[in-house]
Image (cartoon, rainbow, N blue to C red):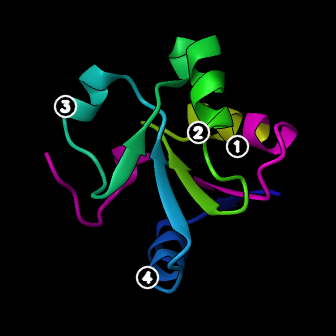
Amino acid sequence: MAEDITQEEWQEQIANDNNAVILDVRTEEEVEDGFIPNMLNLDIRQGQDFLDELEKLDKSKKYYVYCRSGARSAQACTLMNQMGFKTAYNLIGGFMNWDGETAE
C-alpha cells in the first residue's frame, strides 16, 4: 500500500513505529543541503541501480519516503508497491516544506 501522509502524521507514526525506515530518494547534492535524521539515501534518478538497491531491503518493514517536493517519492512508493513492499508512505510536500528535525 502506498499512502500520502502529512508531516504531522509522518512524525507521529515514526515516533511510534520501531519498524520504520526513512528513505530519502534525492540526489547526493540535494542531501548535502540537509536531510531528515537517520535516513537511508537511495537516489531514484539512478534508475536500475535504485531498483537493485531496493531489492536488497526488507519488504516487511514500513518505509517513510521523501524527496524535495513529494513527486519523486510518490513515484518511488508506486515502484516499491509493484516490487512487493507492504507499506510505503509518501511525505506530502517533501523536504522543501519539512519543518521537523533536520541534520547536515
Name the residue furthest bottom.
Answer: 16
**Amino acid type assigned to the residue bearing label 1 in the image:** Cys
Q: Which of marks 4 and 1 is nearer the N terminus?
A: 4
Distance between mark 2 and mark 4 Cα atoms? 20 Å
Is 10 located above or below residue 48 in the figure? Answer: below
Kindly identify the residue that appears in the image at 60 percent across and 57 percent down.
63
Helix, strand or loop at disc 2? helix
The answer to whether residue 37 shows anywhere in this view is yes
Helix, strand or loop at disc 4? helix
Does residue 17 show up magenta in the picture?
no
Q: Which mark is residue 73?
A: 2
Please give the residue where the numbered disc 1 appears in the rendered image: 77
- Residue 33: give x, y in percent of width and height: 19, 34
Distance between mark 1 and mark 3 Cα atoms? 23 Å
Query: Callout 4: 10 Å neighbours few (<14), some, many (20+)?
Result: few
In front here: 102 or 87?
A: 87
**60 on left or right of 35:** right
Does residue 95 show up magenta in the picture?
yes
Please give the residue where the numbered disc 3 appears in the rendered image: 32
Distance between mark 2 and mark 3 Cα atoms? 18 Å
Kindly identify the residue that appears in the image at 83 percent across and 57 percent down.
1
Q: Earlier in the sequence, mark 1 or mark 3?
A: 3
Name the residue furthest left.
Answer: 104
Kindly identify the residue that appears in the image at 46 percent across and 55 percent down.
22
